[in-house]
Image (spheres, rainbow, N blue to C red):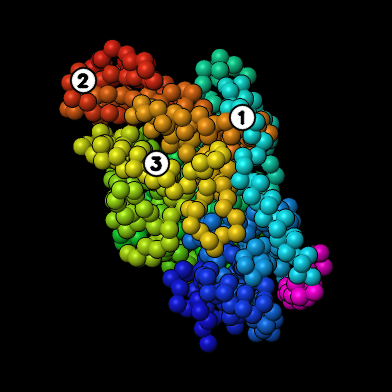
Amino acid sequence: MPNRLAQERSLYLKQHAGNPVDWWPWCPEAFAVAQASGKPVLVSVGYSSCHWCHVMARESFEQPWIAELMNQHFICIKVDREERPEVDKLMMDAVQMINGHGGWPLNCFCLPDGRPFFGGTYFPPEDRGHGQVPWPQLLMRVSDFFHRSKAELAANADAIAQNLTHLTRAPDADGSSPQPADLLAAAKRLCEQHDDTYGGFGGAPKFPSPPTLDFLLAIRSTAAAEQDRALATRLDAVLTVTLGAMARGGLFDQVGGGFHRYCVDRDWTVPHFEKMLYDNALLLGTYAEAWARYRDPLYARICEETVAWLRREMRLPNGLYAAALDADTDHEEGSTYVWKPAEVVALLGEEALPFAAAYGLTDQGNFEGANIPKLRAKTAERDRLAPARAKLLAARDLRPQPARDDKALLGWNALLVRQLAKAAWIFGRKDWFALAAAAEDTIWRLFATEGPTVALRAVAHGDEATLAGNLTDYVWLAQAELALAAYASWGLPGQTARFSARAHALMDAAATRFADPHAVGYFFATADREDLSVRQKDWFDNAVPAGNSSLIHACAESHALTGEERWQVALTDLAQAYGGMARNVPNGVAHALDGLTRHALGLAVLKHAPNADMDRLQAALCGQVNTSAHARPFRGLHLQPEPGTAGFQLCVGSTCLAPTTDVTAIAAAL
């Protein structure tokens, strides 16, 4: 008999609707029952495309005898981390504090009032000799300890809550803002962590790190890097080795386009096969900007094929984009994506041999007897084999496919809108800009309530949006509006003012709902969230940029465009939180450091006559006329139509050049 989750819209919750566990969704009623029954609460967090979440569900949550233990001793709550990131953050931070590490599935034990006191990630159903406590045994231990030692657990929960509250203060903050020397030192420290052999930062598993790469790209554009040849050479090596390794390895779907979540090995061969919207949004922007600097044609192909995959497999009927594709197909990880040589021969005939050589296919395989394609050939050979890849993709489409989570998350779609607008400008693709603008239009129709203060909802299933937005929803959408405003004169003339007004309305709303009047930083959730035992701040980037890091960018851009002092004040206040973090944990705050670096470089505002030839300008600034000529590294630029301007006038801060009609002079000045 289905449990309560059968009534939920979340795909992840529905995946557990047939469990014999008496699951509750996250709601006040569940905690009221816990209080009345005197039972502890189990909060189990995951997401629909998570392989190990599926494994634990099959091994434990679907087993009647284990479910009976859970039902007898706990009030059990299932949470979709993508729909409720504020709940996930609270539980994850508590578990990381207890164990020193975290992940999903996330299983956190709480007092009846919701305060966490213990937890972990995946637990097996029996003792497998790896030092992991079996799940049934853990359940009985926790329940027994709860009833025997409630006072001790309450003290433990209080200590965890106090520590989490302490972490809302910016770690290592000493009141100093990162100075240019700190930013350069942070970049050098990140380069020291680079795997020069295989690319990436640190050992296996290997995750893409768009905020880190974006920061290093920004540092590469500084005068200091241009003048220090050793630093410039090191940055170029780090960036091109990692970008090339991710583009050529199993992280990128060589047949169908788009990036998987991460790779389990050091050399980027075997991915964790789920595909997330946020990874692809962020990496699209990173590769577009890298192409602007290095002109590697492979980077352009990565961008083109990522957008093609998004349009083909992730776009929803309303113009937004689905959250994720599952890691598993029919309970088997990656089976949709791998190939055996005989399959390739049957499809490609004489082209099978050069294709196998170009993509490293062997009889032995590199994944459970089959092959995950990895590009070994040059880009020209890759281009020649495009028809062969198309044949493989057509055949692959006939296989069973991983499930798609069709919920539309405002925040993740906003990340995509921003990067799609930037990539559209860099590559001169007005069709990509139209995709970004269409998604933005749907976002405002579905998620926003306009009034004296904008209010956002966070999650949409079909055309029904629910759940209040968090800080990142407001700030990421503000950043998306700023990116659309920056290039609207070229991509959607006449809309610059509308996008700018929406950006600043969102910034005002974020300040009203999330700013801390007593200390630096913005809270992640609104003050009225009585269901959260701690109101937290989001300082460190994870798979997505942190809310406060994103505010650095939005405040810097808003000040450059409006000249309003309040945005400079907000930026200065926020920057003071990052002095210690820049020195001690630059990998955790790379997005903030990226924003501070670009602010130091200065956002360029290009005033132009309303009838100016914007296509000619784009070609001159982005190098589309002759892509083999000198690269023109991407930098922040905002096109601003202004009646009375003769041609173009470039301004950075309070300094403006003389107006000119010579677009090559503008390009040279930038």
For image coordinates 67% across by 76% down, the residue present is 39
Whether 215 is drawn above or below 109: the answer is above
Whether 363 is drawn above or below 281: the answer is below
Whether 336 is drawn above or below 525: the answer is below
Q: Where is residue 669 in the image (x, y as percent from the top left)?
A: 37, 16
Three-letter amino acid code of the residue under disc 2:
Thr
* Disc 3 element: helix
Marked residue nearer the N-terminal end (3 or 2): 3
Give the magenta range: 125-148
Q: Residue 179 colored magenta?
A: no
Neighbour tally class for label 2: few under 14, some 14-19, many 20 plus, Cα within 10 Å? some
In this rendered view, identify the residue nearer to me: 167 or 251. Answer: 167
Which residue does the numbered mark 1 point to in the structure image? Answer: 175
* Disc 1 element: loop
Q: Nearer the viewer, mark 3 or mark 2?
A: 3
Three-letter amino acid code of the residue under disc 3:
Met
Q: Nearer the viewer, mark 1 or mark 2?
A: 1
Q: Position of residue 289 (x, y in %)?
A: 45, 34
Q: Residue 507 carries which label?
A: 3
Q: In which quarter of the image is residue 557?
A: top left
* Disc 2 element: loop
Which residue does the numbered mark 2 point to in the structure image? Answer: 645
Q: Quadrant of residue 605?
A: top left
Q: Does residue 246 appear in the picture of this structure?
A: no
Q: Which of marks 1 and 3 is in front?
A: 1
For image coordinates 65% across by 46% down, the residue present is 167
Please give left or right for residue 103 compared with residue 559 in the image: right
Q: Where is residue 252 in the image (x, y as percent from the top left)?
A: 52, 49
Please give left or right for residue 385 compared with residue 488 in the image: right
For image coordinates 59% across by 16% down, the residue present is 228
